[in-house]
Amino acid sequence: MSPATTGTFLLTVYTLFSKVHSGRNVYPSAGVLFVHVLEREYFKGEFPPYPKPGEVSNDPITFNTNLMGYPGRPGWLRYIQRTPYSDGVLYGSPTAENVGKPTIIEITAHNRRTFETARHNLIINIMSAEEFPLPYQAEFFIKNMNVEEMLASEVLGDFLGAVKNVWRPERLNAINITSALDRGGRVPLPINDMKEGVYVMVGADVAFSSCLREVENPQNQLRCSQEMEPVITCDKKFRTHFHIDWCKISLVDKTKQVSTYQEVVRGEGILPDGGEYKPPSDSLKSRDYYTDFLVTLAVPSAVALVLFLILAYIMCCRREGVEKRDMQTPDIQLVHHSSIQKSTKELRDMSKNREIAWPLSTLPVFHPVTGEVIPSTHTDNYDSTNMPLMQAQQNLPHQTQIPQPQTTELSPLLLLSGI
């Protein structure tokens, strides 16, 4: 790389990443990456109490950015700030549709300790690029970087320098930078210093080098389908600082793409003249809705009434009855059914009049001395089914008591004397 080319390249990167403070005009080019850093140090002097010279203030500051008069930012402009103690970054790739139109971005800084706010305006004047878009574009996926790390001027400058050594174009510009999370990627686990990953698109004015096209050969395509790293000869020029996923590289050749743009014929935006508007007259004829009422209400009612009569005739006037059923039943079946009914009735009658023998404990008891018969304690009407088999003996008036032997306690002296 010649010294003149190196000086031009560094000048381009420095101009691209010059930290222009809010309230000033910036002049990005269409189709070229635009980055504007919102420095916390600049806004610290906007919040009271104002720091004295030499004092260090580390208040948490966050930023809100929006297009003047609208709640959000333009579609091409994105914003990121990781923590209230880091700088905010506005970045994006301006489109050719906004060339020549000043875009005013309102930047509101919030001091999270004192709850003070400060507002500045950033006026973005998009300029037309010399050659837009660049005919050859390549998009790299860097696995070991976050978007705010890649937006730093030193890091992006090193990456563009590595790409230029591999590609060797006359013009090389960073077109866009996108976080992997915006492409559907997952948030990495907070282990081993894992990064989100970032997509970096660059454009050049010459065809792709043989090294960049190595990923398109069948062997590398097969390795990518098997989730293996392809063999790229120029990977060592990036490996020191950037881990590139070569299976996700995208090479776009604008010169071979067929343009599908169709010219739109714009009219004046005025509808063809259809004459003057003629409102309806005030003298409208009255309309009779009696016929519509009959058709809407009477016809369904008549159909429902006919269906009700048919159902009533079937259920009430078409019943066969018991006599007709017996006439159509064979005599043998009727006799068999009648005998079953008679047998069932007899069994039920017999179950009501069955007699159960009294238990022995309830039979008459003879007095052991007089011989008199003691009447039973139960009457004939007593329900024998609930009668216990054994009953507690009662002391009847004519029952003699059997004397119980009485035991006498012997004195210890008699027991010792052997009496």
Image (cartoon, rainbow, N blue to C red):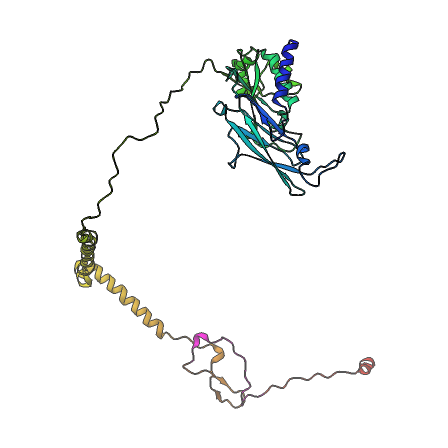
Viewer can see residue 36? yes
Rendering coords of residue 410 (x, y %): 77, 83
**Residue 341 position in % (x across, y down):** 27, 65
User: Which quadrant of the view contains residue 336?
Assistant: bottom left
Q: Is residue 198 shown to the viewer in this render?
A: no
Q: Nearer the viewer, residue 325 or 302?
A: 302
Task: Give coordinates of residue 328: x percent, y percent.
Answer: 17, 58
Foreground of the two, 353 or 57: 57
Q: Looking at the magenta stretch, what is its main secondary structure?
A: loop
Q: Residue furthest front?
A: 276
Question: In the shown orientation, is residue 306 left or right of residue 173?
Answer: left
Magenta segment includes 295: no
> Is 350 in front, or is 310?
310
Q: Position of residue 182 (x, y in %)?
A: 54, 30
- Side of 369 where 83 appears, left or right: right
State the residue at coordinates (42%, 17%): 259
Res. 319 image quadrant = bottom left
Looking at the image, which residue is at 22% across and 48% down?
282
Read off the magenta span: 382-400
**Hey, which residue is sitting farthest top in the picture?**
2
The image quadrant where one finds the C terminus is: bottom right
Compared with 334, 91 (above or below) is above
